[in-house]
Image (cartoon, coloured by chain):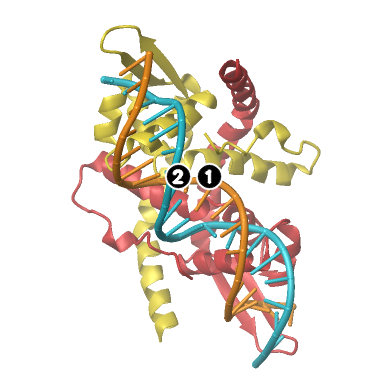
Chain colours: A red, B yellow, C cyan, D orange
Amino acid sequence: MSQGNTDVTAQARVVDPEKLEVCTVLEVINRISGKWAIGILLEATRGPVRFTELERSVEGISRRMLTLTLRNLERDGLLVRTVYPTVPPKVEYEATAMAKELYASLSGFLHWAERHRDSIAESRVVYDEKVSA
Amino acid sequence: MSQGNTDVTAQARVVDPEKLEVCTVLEVINRISGKWAIGILLEATRGPVRFTELERSVEGISRRMLTLTLRNLERDGLLVRTVYPTVPPKVEYEATAMAKELYASLSGFLHWAERHRDSIAESRVVYDEKVSA
DNA sequence: CCGGATCCGCAGAGATACTG
DNA sequence: CAGTATCTCTGCGGATCCGG
């Protein structure tokens, strides 16, 4: 894992409250952004999921990125990884309480996205036409 | 602009509702993720801002990235760009109503981030210690 | 003052093949 | 089944110079 340089502990603590707000959000946004984290989190929120199940349900994800994203989410305490020492091996991932809260807290944002989805799409079309003209 | 390949209009429409939810959120997340968009949006939400003001207040941003991010936000209809044909030129950016709603809808998420900020930091420390051991 | 154009380094991510 | 390992390619983003 060559990343993980967004170290929360190193963040400035003594800034004005507004800046701090922005920083905090950015940390988390940068963690759950990227193509895959959200999708994985959604599946894991419903209950324990196995590696191969995720590989199929997340659709389009490579083995590598699935592993990396899972590790990052686990590192942030959003996922718990449980290994069953059976043959063949069995590994389950489940969302923590914190992750479920996260998902709940996202609902406002989610509804915004749904409401304005079309507006955004249209705005892009208009903009692109104006540019290419 | 070499990016902008996350074309909303090309997104699948005929999928089950849950997948659609995920896609919608992902589109927007990928738009407002990246180091700069959120900070810029915050400034612009308070009222019209000039290019140079943003360059100072966003802190750490380069001219190039400021321009690119502004263009993308404008393209998505989150920012309005107003040019005053004076000498020297004056350009103002202001958040649209949609952008202000976005910021409001983010508040739940924002509070989550504040509440769990320390938990995440601690979780990372623990994880890293276990890995390096 | 507000950008655009270009060059370039580096991390993120895909493809493929191999293991306990 | 659940990962590693490596190789490569893409494109974000910084630096720099130019223009209206």
Residue under pointer 2: B34
Q: Kindly identify which numbered label has been placed on residue A43.
A: none
- In the image, residue B57 sits, relative to residue A100, either above or below, namely above
> What residue is rendered at 40% in x and 69% in y?
B124
Q: Position of residue B34 (x, y in %)?
A: 45, 44
**Mark 1 → mark 2, Cα distance in angstroms:** 18 Å
Q: In the rendered structure, which amino acid carries the disc numbered 1?
A: Leu
Q: Residues within 10 Å of mark 2 (few under 14, many from 20)?
A: some
- Between A4 and B65, the one lying in front of the other is B65
Q: Residues within 10 Å of mark 1 (few under 14, many from 20)?
A: many
> What residue is rendered at 60% in x and 22% in y?
A128
Q: Nearer the viewer, mark 1 or mark 2?
A: 2
> What residue is rendered at 47% in x and 66% in y?
A77
**Which residue is outermost to the left?**
A14
Residue under pointer 1: A106
User: B126 left or right of A126?
Assistant: left
Local secondary structure at mark 2: loop
Quadrant into which the C terminus of chain A falls: top right
- In the image, residue A123 sits, relative to residue B107, either above or below, namely above
Local secondary structure at mark 1: loop
**Label 1: chain letter:** A
- In the image, residue A94 sits, relative to residue D16, either above or below, namely below
User: D7 left or right of B88?
Assistant: right
Q: In the rendered structure, which amino acid carries the disc numbered 2?
A: Gly
